[in-house]
Amino acid sequence: MIATPTVNKDTFSVSTPADDEIRMTRLFDAPRKLVFEAMSRPEHVRRWWGCLGEGYSVPVCEIDLRVGGKWRFVNRHPQGEAAFHGEYLELDPPGRMVFTEIFEDYPDVVTTVTSVLTEEGGKTRLTATVKYPSSEVRDIVRSTGMEHGAGLSYDRLEDLVAELSRA
Amino acid sequence: MRTDPLSATFAALADPTRRAILERLARGECSVTELAEPFAMSLPAISKHLRVLERAGLITQRRDAQRRPCRIEATPLRDAAGWAEHVRAVWEGRLDRLDAYLDELTKQQTNPQETKP
């Protein structure tokens, strides 16, 4: 387990470039090539993806890194397992990667993730744009606090859901 | 329109009147007339919203003479909220972990003798 504090946490920000998209951006203290490799090689992905602490691991990490190639990651966590899979749609290392992503518990929701890596003052900025099947889906995701309380249109729904989960 | 359960839930929740109806029903079962009261809407207009909510499985309506009481069904809402919360946690967690991992990798490259994987 890696215990290093995340120094670039404050550089995380979220925006909504289209009504069915969420864009997340974050700075990393590493060269672009290394960030791309960390995101696309199984030996690296196993070490960070979904490894939130003790009791987390990545028992399955399959990457067929070519356009049309499939990927599948399984995250083991203290409550069980969460599996994700998808297909690479565009690859342009070390600057761009587009893939579909499906959380297997909800196989009907197909999202498309566009990851762009840019150099910024010796660091690397990752901009991940997630496209959801509809604006409603996007709004629900946004309402769960991705923007840390900024301009939430569904805050009343959040309250309702909280009320229901207590019931 | 997509017909999978999660999309039906999201589509039903997209309308502010329907969210307000659900909030009212979260406090307890009530009739269509009672539901219509706080809204400047006709009974047929409210009934239309109720049909959307019913098709999405978010409410059920009992055939109790004229009253036709409505009640909220929590499961689809919990599923939608669970999915969304999961997505949020996953993304935040992923980016934090990637940052920590890259930090470890770059340290290894500068001090190879000091840190071993």
Image (cartoon, helix red, strand yellow):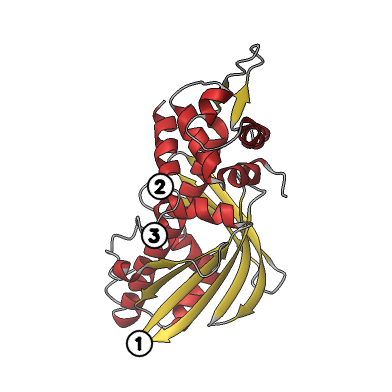
Disc on the earlier residue, 3 or 1 = 1
* Of pointers 3 and 2, the one earlier in the residue sequence: 3
User: Of discs 3 and 2, which sits in the foreground?
Assistant: 2
Is label 2 in contact with label 1 (beta carbons under 8 Å)?
no
Residue B102: % across, % down: 38, 72
Does label 2 or label 1 sit earlier along the sequence? 1
Decide if residue B44 is on the left or right side of residue A15: right
Q: Secondary structure at mark 3?
A: loop
Q: Which mark is residue B101?
A: none
Marks 3 & 2 on one chain? yes
Picture coordinates of residue A72 (x, y %)? 62, 57
Near-viewer residue (A74 or A141): A141
User: Which chain contains the residue that carries disc 1?
Assistant: A
| Location of mark 2 (residue) | A155
Residue at image location 46% in from the left, 47% down from the top: B85
Q: CA distance from mark 3 to mark 1?
A: 27 Å
- Residue B117's x, y, as percent? 37, 66
Image quadrant assignment for residue A73: bottom right
A35 versus A47 height, above or below = below
**Residue type (three-letter) at the residue carrying disc 2:** Asp
Which amino acid lies under the numbered mark 1 shown in the image of this protein?
Gly
Does residue A28 appear in the picture of this structure? yes
Q: Which mark is residue A122?
A: 1
